[in-house]
C-alpha cells in the first residue's frame, strides 16, 4: 500500500508536468500570423515559482531542469542556460522558504518580481556576452513586466483550481515530518 503523503506528492508532480506541458503546447500554437507587440508572460516560470513557494516538495530541482530544458529545445533557444538560471533562482527561493512562508502576499510578489527580473537580466547578459542573436533589451523588459503582472493570476489559479497552498508553520505530514 502506498503512503498517502507520497502518493499526493507524486500526483502533484504529475499535475505540474501536465500544466507545464499545456503551457508549452499553447505557446507553440500558431494563434496569430501577426507578430505580437507586447511579448506574453512566461507562465511556465510563474507556475514554477508559485508551486515552489507554496510546496517546494512538489517541484524538485531535477523536475524543474527537465521541464525548462524541454522548453529550451522546443522554443529553439540555446539549451541549458535558461534552465541553469532558473535552477539557481529556484534554489535561492527554496533555501529561504521558511522565512518567506509567513510573509504577506505583497512581499512575496515583490521578492518574486525581483527574482524574475534578475533571472531574465542574467540570461540576457550571458547571451549578449557570447553574442547569441536574441531580442533586444526592450522586449526582454516587457516580458519581465508581463510575467510579474501575471504572477498573481497564476497564484489564484493554482490556489483555487488545484488547492496548492503554503504549508502552515509547524504543519506536519502523515508521518510527522515538518513541511
Image (cartoon, rainbow, N blue to C red):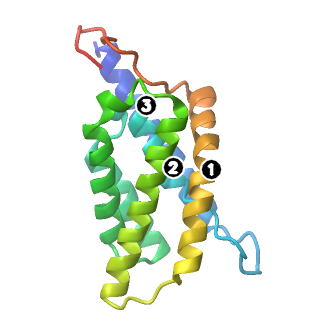
Q: Residue at x 69, y 71 (%)?
A: 38
User: From this viewpoint, is residue 168 visible?
Assistant: yes
Dots 3, 1 in contact, CB < 8 A:
no
Q: Secondary structure at mark 3?
A: helix
The quadrant of the rendering that contains the N terminus is top left
- Of the pair 52 and 25, the residue shown nearer to us: 52
Using the image, determine if residue 152 lies above or below residue 79: above
Would residue 38 appear left or right of 17 to someone viewing this image? right
Q: Position of residue 170 (x, y in %)?
A: 31, 11
Using the image, determine if residue 170 lies above or below residue 167: above
Q: Which quarter of the figure has residue 3?
A: top left
Dots 2, 3 in contact, CB < 8 A:
no
Dots 1, 2 in contact, CB < 8 A:
yes
- Residue of label 1: 150
Query: Disc 2 or 3, which lies upstream in sequence?
Result: 2
Q: Position of residue 120 (x, y in %)?
A: 43, 66
Please tell me the numbered disc located at residue 46: 2
Amino acid at each position: 500500500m502506498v503512503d498517502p503523503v507520497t502518493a499526493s506528492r507524486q500526483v502533484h508532480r504529475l499535475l505540474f508536468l501536465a500544466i507545464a506541458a499545456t503551457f508549452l503546447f499553447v505557446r507553440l500554437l500558431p494563434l496569430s500570423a501577426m507578430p505580437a507587440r507586447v511579448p506574453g508572460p512566461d507562465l511556465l516560470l510563474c507556475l514554477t515559482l508559485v508551486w515552489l513557494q507554496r510546496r517546494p516538495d512538489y517541484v524538485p530541482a531535477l523536475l524543474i531542469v527537465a521541464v525548462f530544458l524541454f522548453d529550451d529545445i522546443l522554443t529553439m533557444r540555446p539549451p541549458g542556460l535558461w534552465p541553469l538560471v532558473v535552477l539557481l533562482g529556484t534554489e535561492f527561493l527554496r533555501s529561504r522558504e521558511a522565512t518567506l512562508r509567513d510573509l504577506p502576499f505583497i512581499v512575496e510578489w515583490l521578492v518574486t518580481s525581483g527574482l524574475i527580473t534578475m533571472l531574465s537580466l542574467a540570461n540576457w547578459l550571458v547571451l549578449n556576452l557570447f553574442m547569441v542573436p536574441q531580442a533586444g533589451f526592450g522586449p526582454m523588459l516587457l516580458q519581465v513586466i508581463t510575467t510579474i503582472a501575471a504572477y498573481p493570476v497564476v497564484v489564484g489559479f493554482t490556489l483555487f483550481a488545484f488547492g496548492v497552498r503554503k504549508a502552515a508553520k509547524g504543519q506536519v505530514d502523515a508521518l510527522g515530518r515538518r513541511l
